[in-house]
Image (tube, rainbow, N blue to C red):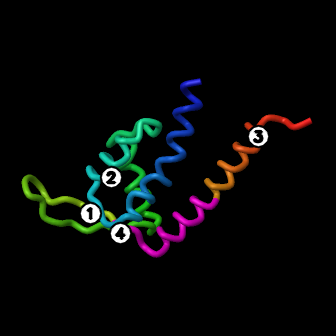
Amino acid sequence: MQGWVTQLRKGLVELSVLHVLRRGESYGYEIVQALRDIDALAVSESTVYPVLTRLREEGLVRVREGASPEGPPRRYFSLTPQGRLRLAELSAHWDLVVEAMRCLRAPKNG
């Protein structure tokens, strides 16, 4: 069963990253921390950073470098208009999946 759970989590990382960025610009480590707080996702830097790279390559997020209080500059990520559209599409589909599962899990009448 662990393989199935892992695949489900991987499928939710993109949607989760987009939701974090919906709140506003964030740097990579902030995104990782926001998602680490959600036990069901079990994400790490090695899962989030490749997703951020792919989202940037697809034009769904933009990246800018900014100063860091200490250490090297930070890379800040934010949603593009296309990213907001993808988030809306994925969220709508997720809502359909959740509703379908709710129907399937409901006790059978009759």
Residue 107: % across, % down: 79, 35
**Region of the chain picked out in magenta, as a range:** 78-92
Tell me the SS state at disc 3.
helix
Residue type, numbered disc 2: Ile
- What residue does disc 2 label? 31
Specify the quadrant that holds the C terminus. top right
- How far apart in space, not on screen, are marks 1 and 4 (Cα)? 8 Å
- What residue does disc 4 label? 62
**Badge 3 vs badge 2, beta-carbon distance below 8 Å:** no
Residue type, numbered disc 3: Leu
Residue 103: % across, % down: 76, 44
| Earlier-in-chain disc, 2 versus 1 | 2
- What residue does disc 1 label? 76
* Mark 3 surroundings within 10 Å by alpha-carbon count, few (fewer than 14), some (14 through 19), many (20 or more): few
Q: How many marks?
A: 4
Quadrant of the rendered structure where residue 23 is?
A: bottom left
